[in-house]
Structure formats: structure tokens, C-alpha cells
Amino acid sequence: MNSIVETIRIGLLRSGLELKQFLRQRESVVFTLFFPVILLFIFGTVFKDTIAPGVTFSQYFVAGMIASGLVNTGFQQLAITIPMERDDGTLKRLRGTPMSVSSYFIGKALLVTFLMIIQTALLLFFGSVVFDLNLPTQAHLWWNFTWLVLLGSACSTILGIAFSIVPKSGRGASAVVSPIVIILQFFSGVFFVFTSLPSWMQQFAALFPLKWLTQGMRSVFLPDDFATQEVAGSWEIGKTALVLTIWLVLGLIFAIKKFKWSRE
Amino acid sequence: MSAGAAIEVRGLSKKYGAKTAVDGIDLTVERGEIFALLGPNGAGKTTTVEILEGYRKASSGDVRVLGFDPATKGNAAQRWRNQIGIVLQSTSDAADLSVFETISHYANYYENPRNVEQVIDEVGLREKLNAKARELSGGQRRRLDVALGIIGSPELLFLDEPTTGFDPEARRSFWDLIRTLQAEGKTILLTTHYLDEAQALADRVGVINNGKIIEIATPQTLGGRNHAPAKVTWLENGVTNSLHTKDPTAEVLKLSQRFNGQIPELEVLRPNLEEIYLKMIGELK
């Protein structure tokens, strides 16, 4: 059998198995899929102001929440669960079979993409029902939205796999990974309006993908003239695609070279 | 399939910094053979086996497993992995998947998998088919590991302490399974702490200590067991008597003459494998 076809076939089977295992862990289902919705309820209820004519904070916040959802389901989830799989013997057992590492990566990427779609749908649904979220009406905005979700998922997945070598054990992984994600969320304009942050924070955040994802999502969900209120005075869509692609490629090279199948 | 022995190891060494875990091992396991590797914890057993399985890299020496260097990477390694099965020491993965889901999923990884239903019967997990791995007892969990080791229909099966946590009945049926696999022409490399298991299954045993192979022999001849003095015991005047002798037949004949035939409660005992083994590793400590 053609080995590329076989690698993809096993990758698809793995994604099904990954999803099955994910859905059977109630706490991770609630945390990953519903946590952003819960945050939306809290922030949307507390902050009722408008930050620009016709732009409510919850409109701004949904854009940031979708972007940080990509970081949660991909980077955070994988950087925590892969060290656990390393501890419980999953990875060692897989290493002993003819399954290729690419199939394993494909399985993870599809799981993340699938969860991302569900999570985003939940956010958009509750956002529009409860907080009168305005959904984009133009086709090119939905196109931007689609590639941002897909490129963002891929980037987040690969960086999560790459970062999984950092935590020494599955038990300690959450303590290593979660603070990084939370700090990035604060610095990248998820919980606050980005332009109201100190400029050193903005510049620091600009090194990482999350800032670009939130900005990209704002370009989809906020009125087009809001772009003048961004740091650069525009949405910087091209630059966003470039930064995400660079992180994706670097993460991929690192993940393939350095992926660890066992502790030691 | 390539010709030659299933496993060929020459001068294998593994160093971790200044510590030498494996110190110049030579080992040949023939095709179709069941070979048991014995040794205390920390002797270098697991390191040796994990080098053969391709998990660790040797520091020096020549290793051939089914004619292939396990340290090789890439597509060739994947083809090689189609022919080997590995049962690792204690695991706790796939906790949320059922026995059937896990076994049938792993079957997809191999070119010529065994029949999933048949494997489930062979390891005796029919009644636990839909149970989640986290609900299994220690022994049942171990049988699932064995199922995943044999699902690919391997030419060579590595078993690292496979029957830990088994009750005696489960151990017997596991032994039957291993004998069935041998009858199919498979080669099996086994590590175990149970000497009766090595005695029951192995064609040959190798004793490893401090990273070196001390002896390789059949279970019957290990440590000069076949020539070791036997213990003869019998009942005389209400007291149990015993003596150690290199020639038990002569002693029994003498006793038989003395008792005019029947010797009360006669027993002739060779030292068992465990005693021989403990003596071997004890002497070297």
C-alpha cells in the first residue's frame, strides 16, 4: 500500500480514537468546550460598555475568545496531555508499532480542528443569542475567518506538540503551561482592549501568534472602520498570515526533530 | 523473512555517563526459540531488551534483530516493526477505551494482523470485551497488554515480565498461549522474576547480573543443576532422615535393600531453578 495514503488513513483512525477518548473525559469536555462560553457570560455581563460607536465590549471579547480558544484547544491541551501520554505509556507503546509519527500528529491536528469548530460554533451561537453579537455579512470576512481558524489550529497544534517536551511530567504539565497561556491572553488583548495596554506589553505580545490571531478575529467581527483604532492603524492581515506561518514552520521543524516518546 | 538467528548480539554495551548498565553482552536467540532472560532488578535486563526493541541506542556493539539493526530510523524501521511485538512492563494507557476498541484499533497498524476476535479469546478477555481498561484488574490489564503485543502477528515477541499480577490459573493459560505461539514458529524473548515460569516455558535461559551474562543454558542444566547433589529424604523410626548425594540412584538402592523394598515417604529432590539462580547471583554480589 502507498505509504502516504496509509499514513493518512491511520491518522484519520487515530483522530477518531483521540476524539472518543476526549469525549469520555467529562472534565476536559467541559473545560475545553464550555469554558470560553462561560467566560463570555461573565465578561459580557460585567462589562456592558461600548468601546467605539456600535462596538460593544462583548463583540470585542468574542473575537479575542475565539482566538484564545485556538490556543486553549491546541497549544494548552496538547502541551498538557502529551506529557501525560508519555507518563502512562501511550507514546512508548505507539513507538513500538509500525504507526508513523506523522499519523500521530495528524490525529492530534484533526482532534484540535474538530474541537475548535465545536467551540467556535458554541461561542457564536451563545454570543448572538445572549449578547446580540453581530456576525459578519460579507463573504470575504467569512473566508478570512476560515483560514484564520485553520491556520491558527495548525499553528497551535504544532506548537503544543513542540512544547510538550518541556514539562518533566504529566502531573506538573498544567502548572508549566497554563500560566504561559494566561499571561499571553492578558498581553494579547483578549481580556482588555489591546490598545489600552502599555506599549512594552503590546510589543512583547507581538512576538507570539495569539496577538495576531486576536487582531485577525477582530478584523472579522468588528466594523471595518475600527481598524483605524488598532496599533498599526490597519488590520495587518498579510502580516498576520506571515507571522502564523513562520511559527507553524518553526514549530513543525522543532516538533519533528525533538519529539520525545518517553521520559528519560 | 531474513535468514539467520532471530536475535544476534555481539559485545553490546550501554553506558549512562560514568555508569555502565550493560557491559559487553553476547547473545544469540534462534528462530522458534523461547529464551528467558533472568536477573535481579538493575542487572541490565530491561536496558538490553529495550535496545533490542529499538527504544534505546547501544553505546557500542553489534545488534541484529530479525537481521535488522533496531537503531535504524525511517521506513525500513516501520517495516521491521511489523514483524515484532512488544509487551512492555506495567502500563496504564488507553484507560477510557474498551478492550475491543483498543485491540481492534491497534490491528490497523499492522500489515497482517491476527484476527481480533481470536486474540480476545486467546488472552481470555471475552467477558471483558466492552469493559474500559481502567475497570480491569491488574491481571486483566496485563492480558490486554499481551493482546496488543500479539495483534500484529509478530515473528518475534518481546515479553517484559508478562505475568505480574496473574493468579495461578491465568498464568497457566498464559503459558498455554505462549506455547501455541511457539508452535506457530514464533520466537519469544521473555524476562521474568518467576523462575517456575522460565522453567515451564524457556528452551534456554540467560542469567544477567551487573550488566554481564553469567551463563546461558537450558533450565535443566543451568548452574550445573543436573550434576548438583540431590537431597534424598525418607522416614525411619518415626523420624525424617535426609542426606545429600551426587549419586541418588545408589543411595536409593542401598535404602531399598535396608528396608527390604518399599522406602517409607521417599523423596529425591534436585535443587530447583530458583535455588540455583539465587546461588548464582548471590555468589557474585
Image (cartoon, coloured by chain):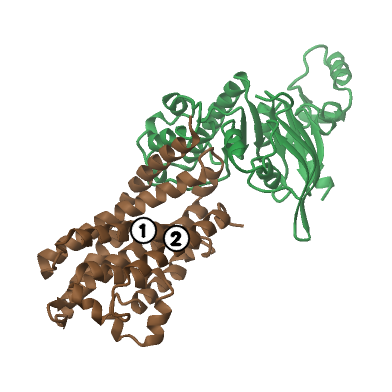
Chain colours: A brown, B green
Between discs 2 and 1, the one toward the N terminus: 1
Task: Specify the quadrant of the image occupied by residue B49.
Answer: top right
Left/right placement of residue B149 relative to residue A49 reads: right
Say which element carries label 2.
helix
Q: Chain of mark 2?
A: A
Q: Nearer the viewer, residue A121 or B92?
A: A121
Instruction: Tell me if mark 2 has few (under 14), some (14-19) or many (20+) residues whose alpha carbon lies within 10 angstroms of its own.
Output: many
- In this view, A147 is above or below B273: below
The amino acid type, in three-letter code, at marker 1 is Leu
Q: Could you tell me if the residues under marks 2 and 1 are in contact, i.e. CB atoms within 8 Å?
A: yes
Name the residue beneath numbered marker 1.
A151
Q: Chain of mark 1?
A: A
- In this view, B134 is above or below A228: above
List x then y, in percent, for residue B232. Answer: 81, 26
Left/right placement of residue A45 relative to residue A104 reads: left
Q: Is residue A176 visible?
A: yes
List x then y, in percent, for residue A154. Answer: 39, 56
Establish whether labels 2 and 1 are both on one chain: yes
**Screen quadrant of the C terminus of chain A:** bottom right
Q: Is residue A26 visible?
A: no
Q: Nearer the viewer, residue B145 or A78?
A: A78
The amino acid type, in three-letter code, at marker 2 is Leu
The number of numbered discs placed on residues in the rendered structure image is: 2
Name the residue located 29 percent from the left edge and 75 percent from the top edge.
Answer: A190
- In this view, B161 is above or below B240: below
Instruction: State the separation of the CA atoms marked 2 and 1.
Output: 8 Å
List x then y, in percent, for residue B16. Answer: 73, 57
Task: Specify the quadrant of the image occupied by residue B234.
Answer: top right
Name the residue beneath numbered marker 2.
A248
Which numbered disc covers residue B113? Answer: none
